[in-house]
Image (spheres, rainbow, N blue to C red):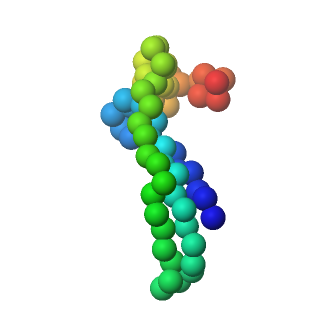
Amino acid sequence: MLIVGLMSGTSLDGIDACLVDVHGAGDRLRWRVRHAATLPWPPGLREAIQAQLDPATSAVDALTE
């Protein structure tokens, strides 16, 4: 089974992506990283994300955009 994992850390420098081939289960679970990359946010997006970090001033429409 191929699984893609995505995350953005607290540095907000971009999004990390990892494609992993997983097979087996329990004690026989095995995986192999097929590819991993960090993609920087487009200009302005980091600032837009940072602007939504304060719950007192964030807006649902901006968070879901």
Whether 2 is drawn above or below 50: the answer is: below
Front-lying residue, 37 or 45 = 37
Q: Which residue corresponds to the image point at 46% horizontal and 36% vertical from the top-left?
A: 15
Residue lying at the far top of the rendered structure: 44
Give the image quarter of residue 61.
top right
Whether 20 is drawn above or below 47: the answer is: below
Front-lying residue, 27 or 55 = 27
Q: How many marks on residues?
A: 0
Q: Which residue corresponds to the image point at 46% horizontal and 24% vertical from the top-left?
A: 41
Whether 43 is drawn above or below 60: the answer is: above
Front-lying residue, 65 or 16 = 16
Whether 42 is drawn above or below 39: the answer is: above
Whether residue 51 appears in this view of the structure is no
Residue lying at the far front of the rendered structure: 34
Front-lying residue, 56 or 28 = 28
Q: Position of residue 43 (x, y in %)?
A: 45, 14
Q: Which residue corresponds to the image point at 48% horizontal and 68% vertical from the top-left?
A: 31
In the picture provided, is 21 more to the left or to the right than 33?
A: right
| Quadrant where the image shows the C terminus | top right
Q: Position of residue 25 (x, y in %)?
A: 57, 80
Whether residue 17 appears in this view of the structure is yes
Residue lying at the far bottom of the rendered structure: 27
Q: Position of residue 56 (x, y in %)?
A: 49, 27
| Quadrant where the image shows the N terminus | bottom right
Q: Which residue corresponds to the image point at 50% horizontal and 83% vertical from the top-left?
A: 28
